Image: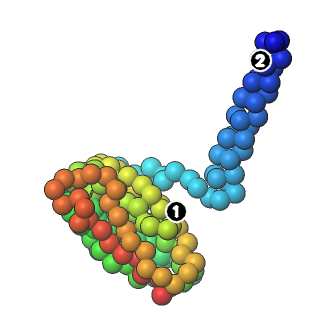
Amino acid sequence: MHVERFEKAFLILSAAMLLTFLGALFYAAWGMGHMLPDREAEIIPAEVTLTPPFDQPGIRQIGENHYEAVIVAQAWAFNPSEIRVPVGARVDFLVATIDVLHGFSIEDALVNGMVLPGQVTRISYTFREPREHLILCHEYCGFGHHAMFGRVIVE
Ligand code: CUA
């Protein structure tokens, strides 16, 4: 048995795997548009409901088929808990928490972020088909965590 030959084979295999994974990473980021949520701004948790735009949570149109959804997260609800948008709408979600850490994830959409006390989370997504999406809190936030959800209705 010649060991060095296997060594060379494993080196080539390792390099090929690294290149494959790097390629998958770049494809996910630029080809499919998977991006980390931006760090938008800082906010004082106790003053979220007094600080614009979080003093008026809800959805508003900011351009042609472009909306901004301002959502306040708290134990154990999203305010508002239901958002209606037309098909094809690009929605910029701005989410802030008034208490503990929450999660903000929309099923079957590339929306998945943490809502950290003191930070504003911004995630954008374009809804391309008429259907209902569940919004889930996926960070354990206490006794009522499992009941913390909302809906995006694309109509
Ligand atoms: Cu909010 Cu879990």
Q: Label 2: few (<14), some or many (≥20) within 10 Å?
A: few
Q: Secondary structure at mark 1?
A: loop
Nearer-the-camera pick, 118 or 52: 118
- Extreme residue toward the left, this view: 143
Identify the residue under disc 1.
Answer: 110
Q: Position of residue 108 (x, y in %)?
A: 49, 68
Q: Quadrant of residue 14?
A: top right
Identify the residue under disc 2.
Answer: 7
Count of numbered tags: 2
Nearer-the-camera pick, 99 or 136: 136
Q: Position of residue 127 (x, y in %)?
A: 53, 75
Which numbered circle lies on residue 74? none
What's the residue at 56%, 53% (across, down)?
Answer: 35
Q: Is residue 5 visible?
A: yes
Q: Quadrant of ligand 1?
A: bottom left
Q: Is residue 79 above or below residue 123?
A: below
Q: Amino acid at mark 1?
A: Leu
CA gap between label 1 and label 2 equals 41 Å
Q: Secondary structure at mark 2?
A: helix
Horizontally, residue 52 falls left or right of residue 152, namely left
Q: Quadrant of residue 31?
A: bottom right
Horizontally, residue 56 falls left or right of residue 27, namely left
- Extreme residue toward the front, this view: 1
Nearer-the-camera pick, 5 or 49: 5
Q: Position of residue 146 (x, y in %)?
A: 25, 61
The color scheme shown is rainbow
Q: Nearer the viewer, mark 1 or mark 2?
A: 2
What's the residue at 38%, 78% (across, down)?
Answer: 83
User: Is ligand 1 closer than 8 angstroms to the Cβ of mark 2?
Assistant: no
Q: Is residue 48 visible?
A: no
Q: Position of residue 34 (x, y in %)?
A: 58, 55
